[in-house]
Structures are given as C-alpha cells and as structure tokens.
Amino acid sequence: MKKMTEHQIVSILKKAEAGIPIKELCRKYGMGNSTFYKWREKYGGM
C-alpha cells in the first residue's frame, strides 16, 4: 500500500459513511481492515 494523504484518507472514510462496504474499500485501495479502523479512530470527525 502506498502512503495516503490526509485528504485521501478522509475521502475514503466519507465513502464508507455513504454506504460503500468497508471490505470493498479495503480491497479497492489495497489496505487491511485494521488500517481502515485505525484511520476512522484518528480521522473520524473530520
């Protein structure tokens, strides 16, 4: 996985909030579920 910018991370989190399944996002962007949940914990309110 390449390093993502804060803007990209927030964009991915917004897609998850919009209803796209987390598994699908993880597969599309090449990250693990744990990475997604760490990001959500850190950037969730942005």
Image: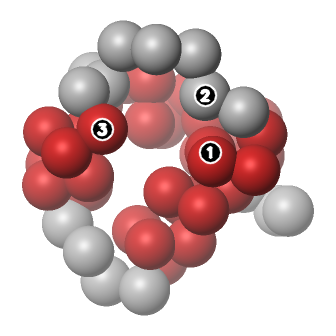
- Residue most extreme to the front: 2
Q: Nearest the camera: 35 or 8?
A: 8
Say which residue label 1 marks.
9
The CA span between labels 2 and 3 is: 10 Å
Image coordinates for residue 6, horizontal then vertical, percent: 77, 40
Left or right: 39 as drawn, with respect to 46: left
- Chosen colour scheme: secondary structure
The CA span between labels 1 and 2 is: 6 Å
Bin the neighbour count of mark 2 within 10 Å (Cα to Cα): few under 14, some 14-19, many 20 and up.
few
Left or right: 46 as drawn, with respect to 10: right
Image coordinates for residue 22, horizontal then vertical, percent: 25, 55
| Location of residue 13 with respect to 39 vertically, above or below | below
Residue type of the residue flagged with mark 3: Tyr
Image coordinates for residue 39, horizontal then vertical, percent: 61, 35
Say which residue label 3 marks.
29
The CA span between labels 1 and 3 is: 10 Å
Q: Nearest the camera: 39 or 28?
A: 28
Q: Earlier in the sequence, mark 1 or mark 2?
A: 2
Residue 4, labelled with which disc? 2
Picture quadrant of residue 41: top right
